[in-house]
Image (spheres, helix red, strand yellow):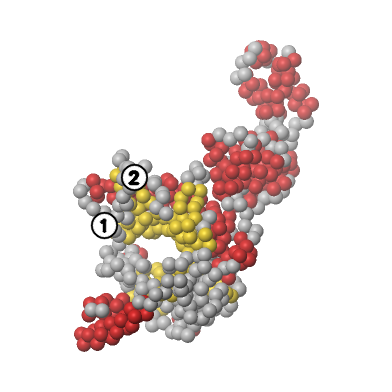
């Protein structure tokens, strides 16, 4: 929330690494975590005489991202962005400048708000610099070490319009974008490995004003949590500056996660002047219709569409918390399992809740389960064969070791009580407690818990609470 | 093109120039810009910009790994090395 009377105006720049096998302009491997400087060649080291050749798969992934973000895909040109910094041995980065491949799109948040996408262009990543000495702080470092494995890795930079109004919305946008990138197959969206990196442009203005305040760019946001915290802090800082009669200075600020503040980097002696010019070693890119179609072939529906489909399947059985659960299962790529379960006749509320809660706790494991086994597991609880507690224990085992849910249940001693033996036990319990039974029959439903407890005791926990209640109701209706 | 402009461009390119050289290059760069201004004066409305002198587009390579260089050989070219990485002087400020 912005301080009263103030509104934040936020735009995000997201860099995402593409899931290609090789770099953008050379055949070196694009791999995270390899030994430093083992994936380098004359092209990505900027050795004289080497020439870049564009990776076709990277272009396909860029077009997938553009399509998923509802962009217009256009003919594009590569430029050199010139600067002197040891993270790029060429002393320039190849990027797209005034003619990017994707322009004018939008992204829909789970609450149906649309955030504009200004552009999503292709560029190469830089090398990884590690500052040594001075506790790793840039300012105090004695020297730096550079690993060029990342130099030349293909990136798409996605620039949003300044349509975002709060830290929460910025987090939602980044989460949605990550889900879209993953669903498009173009990126793994892993912020912790740096394959998705977010910078935030933040400014503030009086509520109701149309003017744009002076913005600051906040960097070093390595998780959705830091993104939210950093923006929250930056909004408060800028409002405090203006309210105390000052003016916000346009600057780049670094998020200090430990201290929870943004700090201005050493002020630049002059604004960067990158002297962009067309990259003479690369020809223009003008994907024709068939190339575009080939790129997006096999791309499944995006999260917003998947949420709509799942809500439709829930057939009106969806509450506000249900909508959150829908967003969760789609984000975790578990919506297919929920749909399969509902289509197989499992109660929609149960299928959604178990998937958004219990299964979501190990989404990775759940994605690797056989959908048939998952539906079978849900059916055991749905049909009252397993209690909720038992079902959770069976799922844990299923995720841990795999196998057949029914066999796991049997091995745990959860085997379903034969219906006639349950009927017999309930009958006995009822006969043993005539006073409680009388009250139950007169409508005191709390007594159901008492009888469930008695049945559980008699069966050492094997009965399903749901099945006991069904039998109690049947008996009392006939009483 | 003033002397200050020439000094600015030289600084961006990390080239140290003497006062005499600045005067010399400011004059030469001014002549280059004058020539470009003549070209720019031509009416090019209705002419598509030339993105590249060679009429080619979509030069692509398949996404297939090719061997990288031997790390020992690569690092042997560097003035300073530490932990398998290029060792560079202390950097002022953040990457642009």
Which residue lies under the disc numbered 1? A249
Left or right relative to A140: residue A433:
right
Q: Position of residue B75 (x, y in %)?
A: 45, 81
Give the Cα separation between the discs numbered 1 and 2: 18 Å
For image coordinates 30% across by 52% down, the residue present is: A213
Q: Looking at the rendered structure, which numbered label has been put on residue A195?
A: none
Q: Chain of mark 1?
A: A
For image coordinates 47% across by 65% down, the residue present is: A100
Which residue lies under the disc numbered 2? A7
Nearer to us in this view, A243 or A370: A243
For image coordinates 37% across by 80% down, the residue present is: B39
For image coordinates 53% across by 55% down, the residue present is: A70
Q: In which quadrant of the rendered view does residue A286 lie?
A: bottom right
Q: Earlier in the sequence, mark 1 or mark 2?
A: 2
Nearer to us in this view, B8 or A408: B8
Q: Secondary structure beneath disc 2?
A: strand
Q: Position of residue A228 (x, y in %)?
A: 40, 49
Q: Position of residue A3 (x, y in %)?
A: 31, 42
Left or right relative to B4: residue B66:
right
Q: Quadrant of the C terminus of chain A?
A: top right
Q: Secondary structure beneath disc 1?
A: loop
Q: Chain of mark 2?
A: A
């Amino acid at each position: 929330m912005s301080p009263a009377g103030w509104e934040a105006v936020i735009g995000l720049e997201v860099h995402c690494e593409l899931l290609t096998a090789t770099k953008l302009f050379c055949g070196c491997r694009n791999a995270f975590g390899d030994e430093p400087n083992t994936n380098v060649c004359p092209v990505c080291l900027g050795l004289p005489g080497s020439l870049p050749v564009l990776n076709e798969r990277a272009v396909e992934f860029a077009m997938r991202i553009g399509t998923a973000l509802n962009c217009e895909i256009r003919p594009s040109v590569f430029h050199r962005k010139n600067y002197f910094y040891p993270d790029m041995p060429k002393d320039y980065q190849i990027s797209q400048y005034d003619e990017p491949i994707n322009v004018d799109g939008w992204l829909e948040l789970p609450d149906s708000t649309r955030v504009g996408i200004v552009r999503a262009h292709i560029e190469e990543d830089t090398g990884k610099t590690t500052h040594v000495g001075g506790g790793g702080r840039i300012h105090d470092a004695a020297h730096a070490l550079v690993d060029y494995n990342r130099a030349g890795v293909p990136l798409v930079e996605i620039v949003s319009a300044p349509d975002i109004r709060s830290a929460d919305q910025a987090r939602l946008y980044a989460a949605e974008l990550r889900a879209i990138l993953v669903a498009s197959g173009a990126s793994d969206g892993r912020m912790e490995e740096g394959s998705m990196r977010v910078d935030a442009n933040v400014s503030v203005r009086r509520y109701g004003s149309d003017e744009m305040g002076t913005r600051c760019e906040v960097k070093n946001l390595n998780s959705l949590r830091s993104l939210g915290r950093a923006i929250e802090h930056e909004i408060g800082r800028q409002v405090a500056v203006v309210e105390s009669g000052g003016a916000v200075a346009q600057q780049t600020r670094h998020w200090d996660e430990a201290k929870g503040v943004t700090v201005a980097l050493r002020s630049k002696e002059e604004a960067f002047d990158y002297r962009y010019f067309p990259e003479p070693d690369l020809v223009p890119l003008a994907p024709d219709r068939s190339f575009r179609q080939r790129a997006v072939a096999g791309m499944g529906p995006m999260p917003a569409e998947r949420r709509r489909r799942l809500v439709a399947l829930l057939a009106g059985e969806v509450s506000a918390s249900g909508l959150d659960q829908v967003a969760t299962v789609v984000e975790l790529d578990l919506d297919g399992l929920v749909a399969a379960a509902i289509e197989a006749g499992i109660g929609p509320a149960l299928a959604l809740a178990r998937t958004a809660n219990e299964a979501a706790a190990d989404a990775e494991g759940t994605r690797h389960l056989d959908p048939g086994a998952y539906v079978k597991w849900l059916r055991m609880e749905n049909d009252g064969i397993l209690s909720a507690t038992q079902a959770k224990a069976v799922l844990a085992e299923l995720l841990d070791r795999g196998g057949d849910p029914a066999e796991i249940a049997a091995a745990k001693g959860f085997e379903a009580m034969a219906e006639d033996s349950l009927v017999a036990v309930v009958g006995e319990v009822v006969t043993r407690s005539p006073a409680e039974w009388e009250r139950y029959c007169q409508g005191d439903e709390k007594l159901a818990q008492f009888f469930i407890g008695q049945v559980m005791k008699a069966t050492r926990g094997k009965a399903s609470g749901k099945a006991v209640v069904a039998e109690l109701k049947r008996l009392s209706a006939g009483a | 093109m003033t002397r200050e402009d020439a000094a600015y461009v030289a600084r961006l390119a990390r080239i140290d120039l003497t006062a005499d050289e600045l005067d010399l290059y400011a004059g030469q760069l001014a002549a280059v810009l004058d020539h470009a201004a003549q070209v720019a004066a031509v009416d090019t409305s209705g002419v598509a910009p030339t993105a590249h002198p060679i009429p080619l587009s979509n030069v692509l390579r398949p996404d297939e790994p090719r061997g990288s260089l031997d790390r020992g050989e690569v690092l042997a070219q560097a003035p300073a090395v530490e932990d398998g990485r290029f060792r560079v002087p202390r950097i002022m400020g953040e990457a642009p």
